[in-house]
Image (spheres, helix red, strand yellow):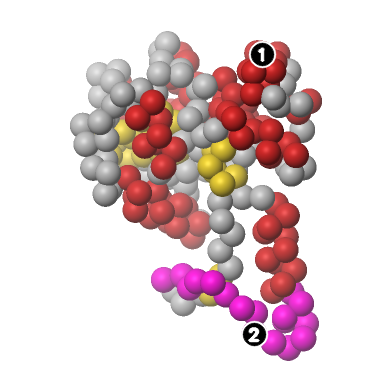
């Protein structure tokens, strides 16, 4: 959600009047609801109201098809897109590019995928939410060790259904932080800096 607000601010758009589309994840996936609720908890207080919202899926082509219809129904005017992950964001960006709008609309994403990081470097995606693999692995190891010892694993929070979980703090990655993902070993500069992103990599020190 914060990535959308940052992108709107960068484009001089007021969140209260901005035209924002939500492209969420598959509702059958419990994570999708958490991502959606987390984004709404940031966007709603800022005054953002969705002009259109997808039924939800983890699918680039389906996201593209939905967004193309939404863009048409909104008269070609969209200021921002909250996207639940980089794959969905990629679908949205393909339609923005098709309509000459790539880089002019705030688009969020998640996962710090190669596609997402490249879009961030190109300025097509405002940022991606990055969850360091090492931190997730450490948390999983703590749980496994506790279970093997016959202990109850410690948990930071509890889901609505009562399931406890360990929260790993996500990091919002804009173009100036892409190198940190590379340094953590979760992306390779060779994958990020080929073709049309080479100039951006040089600008932001991705190597």
Left or right, residue 117 beside residue 157: right
Asked if the stretch drawn in magenta spans residue 150, the answer is yes
Picture coordinates of residue 63, whole percent (x, y): 46, 33
Residue at screen point 56% across, 56% down: 169
Residue 104 in view here? yes
Picture coordinates of residue 143, whole percent (x, y): 69, 74
Q: Is residue 15 above or below residue 79?
A: below
Picture coordinates of residue 194, whole percent (x, y): 73, 18
Quadrant of the drawing holding the N terminus: top left
Question: Between residues 92 and 205, which one lies in front from this camera angle?
Answer: 205
Q: Earlier in the sequence, mark 1 or mark 2?
A: 2
Mark 1 neighbour density, 10 Å: few (under 14) some (14–19) many (20 or more): some
Quadrant of res 141: bottom right
Residue with the mark numbered 2: 152
Magenta highlight range: 144-160
Marks 1 & 2, CB-CB < 8 Å contact: no
Residue reaching furthest to the left: 17
Q: In this view, does 143 lie above or below 86?
A: below
Quadrant of the drawing holding the C terminus: top right
Q: What element carries label 1?
A: helix
From the image, state whether disc 1 or disc 2 is nearer to you.
1
Asked if the stretch drawn in magenta spans residue 62, the answer is no
Residue at screen point 26% across, 49% down: 45
Residue 69 in view here? no
Question: Between residues 52 and 156, which one lies in front from this camera angle?
Answer: 156
Image label count: 2
Left or right, residue 185 beside residue 104: right
Residue at screen point 46% across, 77% down: 162
Q: In this view, does 193 lie above or below 52?
A: above
Mark 2 neighbour density, 10 Å: few (under 14) some (14–19) many (20 or more): few
On residue 180, the disc is none
Residue with the mark numbered 1: 199
């Amino acid at each position: 959600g914060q990535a959308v607000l940052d992108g709107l601010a960068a484009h001089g758009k007021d969140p209260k009047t901005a035209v924002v589309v939500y492209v969420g994840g598959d509702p059958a996936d419990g994570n999708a609801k958490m991502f959606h609720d987390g984004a709404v908890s940031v966007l709603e207080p800022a005054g953002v109201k969705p002009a259109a919202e997808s039924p939800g899926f983890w699918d680039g082509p389906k996201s593209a098809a939905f967004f193309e219809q939404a863009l048409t129904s909104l008269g070609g005017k969209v200021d921002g897109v909250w996207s639940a992950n980089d794959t969905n964001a990629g679908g949205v960006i393909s339609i923005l590019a098709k309509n000459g709008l790539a880089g002019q609309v705030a688009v969020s994403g998640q996962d710090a995928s190669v596609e997402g990081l490249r879009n961030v470097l190109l300025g097509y995606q405002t940022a991606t939410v990055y969850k360091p693999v090492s931190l997730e692995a450490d948390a999983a190891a703590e749980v496994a060790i506790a279970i093997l010892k016959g202990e109850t694993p410690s948990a930071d929070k509890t889901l609505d259904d009562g399931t406890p979980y360990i929260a790993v703090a996500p990091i919002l990655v804009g173009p100036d932080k892409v190198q940190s993902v590379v340094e953590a070993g979760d992306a390779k500069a060779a994958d990020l800096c080929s073709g049309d992103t080479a100039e951006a990599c040089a600008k932001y020190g991705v190597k």
